[in-house]
Image: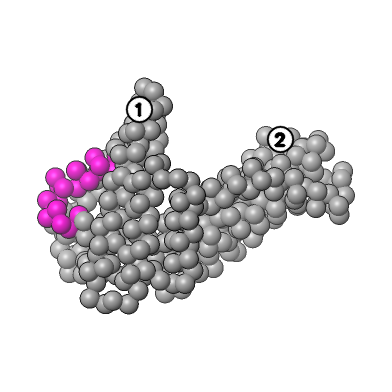
Amino acid sequence: MSEATLNHILEIFYILIGLQFLYTAYRALRSQDKSKSLGTAAFWTILAILFIGGPYIPDAINGLLVLAMGALTLFRQVKIKNIIDVNDKEVEKGSAKYGNKLFIPAIVLAVVAVVVSNWTPLGGAIGLGISSIVGLIAALLIIKPKLSYTLYDSDRLTQQVGTTGILPQFLAALGVLFTASGVGQVISKGISSFLPEGNHLIGAIAYILGMVLFTMLMGNAFAAFTVITASIGIPFVIAQGGDPIVAGALAMTGGFCGTLLTPMAANFNTLPVALLEMKQEFGVIKAQAPIALALIVIHIALMYFWAF
């Protein structure tokens, strides 16, 4: 199967996602509470346009639309509007009626995603799209809700995730920009001016802490890895005799310690707060911080003793 065909199939799923965002924008406009309705509707409409028509819109226009979304978020013009939530009685009634059958759609989704991703030429992204549709069909067959409830619940989840849902994509793009613009070289030159070469312990500390801090800044250890490895890992660890396999693996997992400490890692630390309706905005990070700090020290020790 050609790459062009795969891209066309993937585009279908992006369009479906965009249509869901348009429905969320429509719900925001129809809200009885008009506070920030326009800003909320504008945010979801722009995101829908990017998903549906992004490949056909000039890059400069796409960039301006992204900046507009950032401005709406910065000035707090996006809020949860007009969602239809499920009350506790309905939850208990559904749980008693269907029992463990409620897990079947989730299991179907996971199994189909794994099968399509690993045993077909379609790949992981298309596999997720196909598995989502199959999982939805399974849920409709088992629970038999009104189709309108599917839209309502998709809208509810979309709004509860909110603006943080797009952070992973933006942060991944930011990592590419940092690498392409030579940020790694700038960091390397700055650090080499005061960091002594040949000191294995200082090299290990710099590599791990660099990964932790840059991951906290970007919210993505994968994006941080290329920049920090090029600027610190290679000249101050690997070039000094460090094992690149051991050092690279520990640097990556060390970066994940930074993931535990930052709200920029929205899918790990911010989404649970929204989905679980936690009262403390940084409750997840506070719970993870002691373990993360201990793991940072352990990573430094492991790199010093294992990589050299």
Other-residue count near label 1 (Cα within 10 Å), few / some / many at <14 / 14–19 / ≥20: few
Q: On screen, 143 above or below 29?
A: above
What element does badge 1 sit on? helix
Residue 262 horizontal side relative to residue 113, left or right: right
**Residue 251 in view, yes or no:** no
Identity, as a three-letter code, of the amino acid under mark 2: Pro
Tell me which secondary structure the magenta stretch mostly adopts: helix
Q: On screen, 117 above or below 34?
A: above
Whether residue 251 appears in magenta in the rendering, the answer is no
Q: On screen, 26 above or below 250?
A: below
Residue 244: mark in rendering: 2
Stretch of the chain drawn in magenta: 131-150
**Viewer-proximal residue, 230 or 176?**
176
Residue 267 horizontal side relative to residue 257, left or right: left
Residue 246, position in %: x, y?
68, 37
**Viewer-proximal residue, 182 or 206?**
182
Q: Residue 125 falls in which quadrant of the image?
A: top left
Other-residue count near label 2 (Cα within 10 Å), few / some / many at <14 / 14–19 / ≥20: some
Residue 168, position in %: x, y?
48, 52
Mark 2 / mark 1, whichever is N-terminal: 1
Mark 2 vs mark 1, foreground winner is 1
| Residue occupying the point 35% across, 51% down | 49
**Viewer-proximal residue, 157 or 42?**
42
Identity, as a three-letter code, of the amino acid under mark 1: Thr
Q: On screen, 186 above or below 26?
A: above
**Disc 1 designates what residue?**
5
| Residue occupying the point 16% across, 48% down | 140
Direction top: furthest residue: 1
What element does badge 2 sit on? helix
Tell me the distance, in whole angstroms, between the alpha carbons under discs 2 and 1: 38 Å
| Residue occupying the point 86% across, 52% down | 193
